[in-house]
Amino acid sequence: MSFLFLLAAIVTVMEVFVAVYLIKKHKMKLWQSLYSSLPVIVVVWIAAYMYS
């Protein structure tokens, strides 16, 4: 497994924690937290795929 894929997996897990934090502490809706977290996850995985 490439280092970039490992890094992408770590970023994905961290974004899930950020989304849960935003929902619980800042009373955001699920779609609002996904709107902020999902683009980061997609870009990181695409970059990991392209550069590996």
Image (tube, helix red, strand yellow):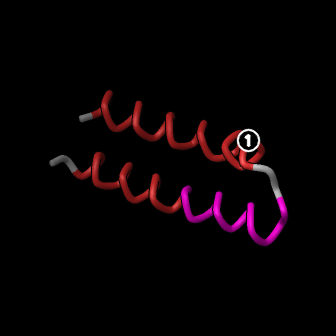
Q: Residue 17 is drawn in which quadrant? A: bottom right
40 on left or right of 34: left
SS at mark 1? helix
Pick the front one: 45 or 35: 35
8 on left or right of 40: left
Q: Residue at x 63, y 46 (%)?
A: 37
**Residue under label 1:** 31
Q: Is residue 21 magenta?
A: yes
- As displayed, is residue 34 above or below residue 24? above
Query: Which percent across, then down, holds residue 9?
Result: 36, 53
- As displayed, is residue 18 above or below residue 9? below
Query: Which percent across, then down, holds residue 34?
Result: 66, 43
Q: Is residue 17 magenta?
A: yes
- As displayed, is residue 28 above or below residue 48? below
Magenta region:
15-27
Query: Which percent across, then down, holds residue 44?
Result: 45, 41
Q: Residue furthest left?
A: 1
- Mark 1 neighbour density, 10 Å: few (under 14) some (14–19) many (20 or more): few
Pick the front one: 48 or 42: 42
Q: Amino acid at mark 1?
A: Trp
Q: Residue at x 40, y 37 (%)?
A: 45
Q: Residue at x 32, y 27 (%)?
A: 50
43 on left or right of 29: left
39 on left or right of 12: right
Q: Residue at x 74, y 68 (%)?
A: 24
Q: Residue furthest right?
A: 27
